[in-house]
Amino acid sequence: MKVNRFRFHALLLFIGGLVWVIVGTRLALSPPGNPALDIYRDSKGSMPLLSIGMLFITSGMVIFYRELFLHKGLAKFAFILIQSGSVLYFIGHSLRQFLNGAWEPAAPVGFIMLIIGMFLFGLRSIKVKSLPVPISYSILISSLCLLFFNDQFFTAWMSVPFGLIWIAIGGALFFKPL
């Protein structure tokens, strides 16, 4: 049962990363915006999909918390930031998509919580050494990709390395002998 649960969460990480790569590439290939000139890239359809991909990733991260004993102190705080940030990010983009809200504060706040949470979680997993070292550093690097991600500019391409990192983590954990 433990093996199935572990692989299920690894699959969630893989799917979430795949969503970020596919949707992020489509978003980055669309005409860029220039908010200074009041020209915006049409990302209304892409951002809710990215938030769903983020829900997959953060749901997959539950295995780190449950099985790898990263549930004390800073790791617990980071995990709570990640999970609540993911939900806020999803709610914010859903409100914008389905209720035609021009701007909602939930998505940016959730996004910042995700970045901080993933960074702290990566730092803690490096120190505790409960995850393989490449995976710990990958989590840290993925948080930096999110830090520079913006749907309106060239930095929309940061969604691709972010997604590839989570595809690699999901694949590594899926095929890891238990």
Image (tube, grey):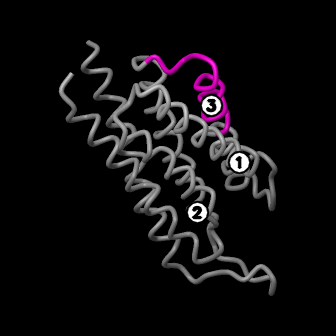
Q: Is residue 54 above or below residue 71?
A: below
Which part of the image, by quadrant, shows the C terminus? top left
7 left or right of 136 in image: left
Which sits earlier in the primary sequence, circle 3 or circle 1?
A: 3
Residue 161: which quarter of the image?
A: bottom left
Magenta stretch: dominant secondary structure:
helix
Q: Gap in Å between the C-alphas at discs 2 and 1?
A: 21 Å
Residue 47 location, x and y as percent? 60, 58
The one of 161 and 98 positioned closer to us in this rendering: 161
Give the Cα distance between marks 2 and 3.
Answer: 29 Å
Question: What residue would you read off at disc 3?
Answer: 78
Which residue carries the number 2 mark?
A: 45
Q: Residues within 10 Å of mark 3 (few under 14, many from 20)?
A: many
Classify the position of the N terminus by image quarter. top left
Q: Earlier in the sequence, mark 2 or mark 3?
A: 2
Q: CA distance from mark 3 to mark 1?
A: 12 Å
Q: Circle 1 is placed at which residue position?
A: 112
What is the secondary structure assignment of the residue under circle 1? helix
Q: Are marks 3 and 1 in contact (CB under 8 Å)?
A: no
Instruction: Give the percent coordinates (x, y) of residue 107.
Output: 72, 49
Amino acid beneath label 3: Ala
Q: Residue at x 81, y 58 (%)?
A: 103
Residue flagged by tag 2: what amino acid is it?
Gly
The picture places residue 112, in percent across and down from the top left corner, at: 71, 48
Is residue 158 shown in magenta?
Answer: no
- Magenta region: 69-85
